[in-house]
Amino acid sequence: EGCPIYPTTVVGLVGELPDPARAGGLALRAGDVIALAGPFAPSLAGSELAKQRGELGAGLPGVDVGAHAAAAAFVRGAVREARVSAAHDVSDGGLACALAEMAIAGGMGAGCDLDAVVEARGASGETALFGEGPGGYLLAGPREELERLTADTEAQGVDLWLIGEAGGEEIELSAAEAEVSVSLGDATAAWTSLAARFE
């Protein structure tokens, strides 16, 4: 429609799943603890927020392939061992959108505090919420399993933060100076309205 195609690399993969019953999912469940894993360093460069603001420019964050491979192997192992019930990559719209997708899928609100991510990555609150970049995974599951995973990450050299918990009817996020709160109903209505916009 007369618009440029953004330079996005797309890779398609096919693999064998040893046990489909342990495929994991996307949906949050009541009482799930939520964690962020991986070398994810949020940036507004090339992000959906930058696009919406008309601020897309040259340059994207760098990639440490070794760190990303280690994080992907760690998440894959956690899912296959049924240690987490849900896993979702952080992509378009950043962590806030990924969490909203998990909440909508489960019909379950969530509350998360991203201050540890802000501090570890030197990001602003807005960037922690809506920044994008490779290597970010949201994980959800029972508290005891997520706490055990936290211990495992140290040995495997993978970053992992426990950032919140599923429950209630609101999606609430805080990150330093930035806060976002939306009802699960409003988020679901906005999400399901997308298909109608393109008809």
Image: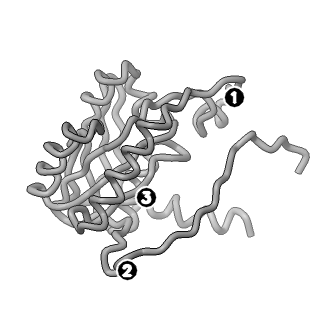
Q: How is the image coloured?
A: one colour
Tell me the residue at 64%/67% (across/down).
Answer: 195
Q: Give the camera-side residue of 167 and 92.
A: 92
Tell me the residue at 32%/51% (across/down).
Answer: 74
Tell me the residue at 31%/40% (across/down).
Answer: 173
| Residue hosting label 3 | 101
Q: Earlier in the sequence, mark 2 or mark 3?
A: 2
- Percent from the top left, x then y, of residue 194? 61, 62
- Percent from the top left, x then y, of residue 6? 75, 41
Residue 47, quarter of picture? top right
Q: Could you give the CA–CA distance between mark 1 and mark 2, rounded to whole angstroms?
A: 40 Å
Figure label count: 3
Q: Is residue 12 shown left or right of residue 4?
A: left
Q: Give the camera-side residue of 75 and 31.
A: 75
Q: Give the camera-side residue of 136 and 185.
A: 136
- Residue type pointed to by label 1: Leu
- Percent from the top left, x then y, of residue 152? 18, 46
Tell me the residue at 26%/57% (across/down).
Answer: 140
| Residue hosting label 2 | 20
- Residue type pointed to by label 2: Pro
Above/below status of 46 relative to 172? above
